[in-house]
């Protein structure tokens, strides 16, 4: 077993946090033109789609690998080749019954995103949905957060998507894939025991490296201190709100789509970014939801939102895994005027970006890899009731041009974020082909009024871009 493919502590934390009623996978819901994906009888060309995916799997080797837990959880698990890998288990067809409307498609996506991925096989799948009205074919993508972060999830789309409608079908690799022999339980247990014993040595090596390069160590320490000081300045704990509660229901999905040009123009007028406009609109949606629930909204009321920041470096394509940090942003839900709310968000985000919050959190997250697995697991599970943020808003940039699957244009795409850690509502954002798509994921029992948030966000976007 190669030590190179052992999960990081951050990757493993998503496994530790997952429960049957709280699946931790990211994903997407998309809609394509139907005709190029159907044969002369109107049936889905499923074998062709599977062959396309199979021909590209060498680009992302982990998609053929399953988890290999270490006995007694002595160490983090590893990815090992799945000797029973079958692409048919991961690229599946689903047919909607008549009338095949958008509501049926949404309910199917909700059901799939409410169910955990089976852990005895690679942790991803694609459901291709036919029977959708309007000459369309749908796609529901799921991939476990232990396998990929938001930006890496975009790479998963390259298994199926092309840049042009006439792109040739990918050729199978010249050498057929052969799985490496999986390690036996004794080898895993031995490796886990060694990992547990050597954890203090990993810490010692880190200290030794710092002694060799004290200038670099000082810079890292100062950056971390500045970033943590920025976090403390806004208060380490999030305000108490009704949107933070235990997860206890299924997933509810709602999405909205607006022209990207209007959002970009609003950002330029305010001297900010597209993400600033998104956050200001989310603040408007939260204001509407909290007002509906009767919560007080004084002018200085804020809600703390975790904004993931990709830390992927050039040349890391194909690595998958989680290479992400975050900024903890207070959103001004107490401000009623949408333009003033946007100005406040722009100023806040500019201040937070000047303080190295993301760099500090990245340093801390990387440091957890030196901890013994049992201690890291205890810390991760404590996060389940975390009091530090109220919700997550993740924004993944997509291409400004259309993509195609076997010649079929992708018409719309909506990202999906998981829930957990005391968060009953979350937002994922994707820019694609001239549009900005926002998906709200909510717990059906803990957040049954998520439509109030979505409607408020839609109004706020219209006010800012109109």
Image: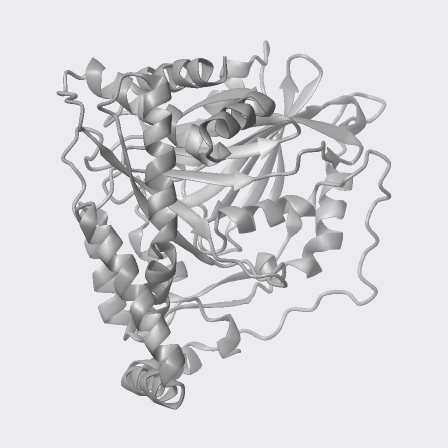
Residue 188: x, y in percent?
41, 78
Would you say 426 lies left or right of 35 here? left
Q: Is 422 above or below relative to 69?
A: above
Taking the spot 85% from the left edge, 23% from the top edge, the residue there is 40
Measuring from the top left, give residue 267's x and y in whole percent. Answer: 49, 29
Foreground of the two, 261 or 110: 261
With 48 as the anchor, is 298 left or right in this view?
left
Q: Is residue 23 visible?
A: no
Residue 424 vs 53, above or below: the answer is above
Along the line of sight, the residue nearer the viewer: 93 or 399: 399
Residue at horizontal 73%, vertical 22%?
34
Front in this rendered view, residue 92 or 242 = 242
Q: Position of residue 98 (x, y in %)?
A: 59, 11
Position of 39 relative to 155 (above/below): above
Residue drawn at (40%, 47%), measured in percent from left and top? 308
Quadrant housing residue 394: top left
Scheme of image coloration:
one colour
Residue located 60% across and 24% down the image:
261
Find the residue positioned furthest to the top: 99
| Mark count | 0
Pick the residue in front: 397 or 77.
Answer: 397
Residue 373's spot in the image, x, y percent?
29, 71
Q: Is residue 151 visible?
A: yes
45 sits left or right of 133 in the view: right
């Amino acid at each position: 077993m190669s030590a190179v493919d052992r999960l990081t502590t951050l990757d493993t934390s998503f496994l530790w946090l997952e429960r049957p009623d709280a699946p931790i996978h990211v994903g997407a819901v998309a809609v394509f033109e139907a005709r190029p994906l159907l044969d002369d009888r109107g049936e889905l060309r499923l074998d062709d789609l599977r062959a396309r995916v199979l021909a590209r799997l060498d680009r992302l080797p982990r998609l053929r690998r399953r988890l290999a837990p270490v006995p007694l959880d002595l160490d983090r698990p590893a990815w090992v080749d799945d000797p029973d890998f079958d692409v048919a288990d991961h690229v599946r067809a689903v047919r909607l019954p008549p009338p095949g409307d958008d509501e049926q498609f949404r309910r199917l996506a909700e059901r799939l995103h409410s169910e955990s991925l089976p852990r005895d096989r690679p942790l991803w799948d694609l459901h291709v949905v036919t029977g959708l009205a309007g000459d369309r074919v749908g796609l529901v993508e799921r991939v476990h957060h232990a396998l990929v972060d938001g930006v890496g999830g975009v790479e998963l789309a390259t298994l199926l998507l092309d840049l042009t409608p006439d792109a040739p079908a990918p050729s199978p690799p010249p050498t057929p894939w052969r799985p490496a022999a999986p390690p036996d339980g004794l080898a895993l247990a031995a490796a886990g025991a060694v990992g547990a014993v050597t954890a203090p040595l990993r810490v010692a090596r880190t200290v030794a490296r710092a002694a060799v390069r004290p200038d670099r160590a000082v810079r890292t320490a100062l950056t971390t201190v500045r970033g943590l000081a920025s976090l403390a300045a806004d208060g380490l704990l999030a305000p108490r709100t009704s949107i933070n509660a235990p997860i206890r229901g299924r997933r509810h999905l709602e999405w909205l789509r607006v022209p990207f040009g209007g959002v970009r123009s609003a950002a330029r007028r305010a001297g900010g970014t597209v993400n600033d406009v998104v956050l200001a609109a989310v603040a408007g949606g939260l204001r509407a939801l909290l007002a509906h629930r009767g919560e007080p909204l004084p002018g200085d009321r804020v809600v703390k939102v975790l904004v993931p920041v990709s830390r992927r470096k050039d040349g890391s394509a194909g690595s998958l895994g989680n290479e992400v940090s975050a900024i903890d942003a207070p959103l001004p839900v107490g401000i009623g005027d949408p333009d003033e709310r946007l100005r406040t968000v722009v100023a806040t985000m500019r201040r937070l970006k000047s303080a190295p919050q993301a760099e500090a959190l990245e340093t801390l997250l990387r440091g957890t890899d030196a901890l013994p697995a049992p201690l890291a697991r205890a810390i991760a599970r404590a996060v389940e009731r975390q009091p530090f943020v109220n919700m997550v808003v993740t924004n993944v940039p997509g291409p400004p041009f259309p993509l195609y699957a076997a010649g079929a244009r992708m018409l719309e795409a909506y990202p999906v974020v998981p829930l957990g850690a005391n968060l009953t509502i979350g937002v994922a954002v994707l820019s694609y082909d001239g549009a900005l798509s926002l998906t709200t994921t909510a717990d059906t029992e803990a957040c049954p009024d998520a439509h109030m948030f979505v409607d408020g966000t839609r109004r706020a976007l219209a006010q800012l871009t109109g």
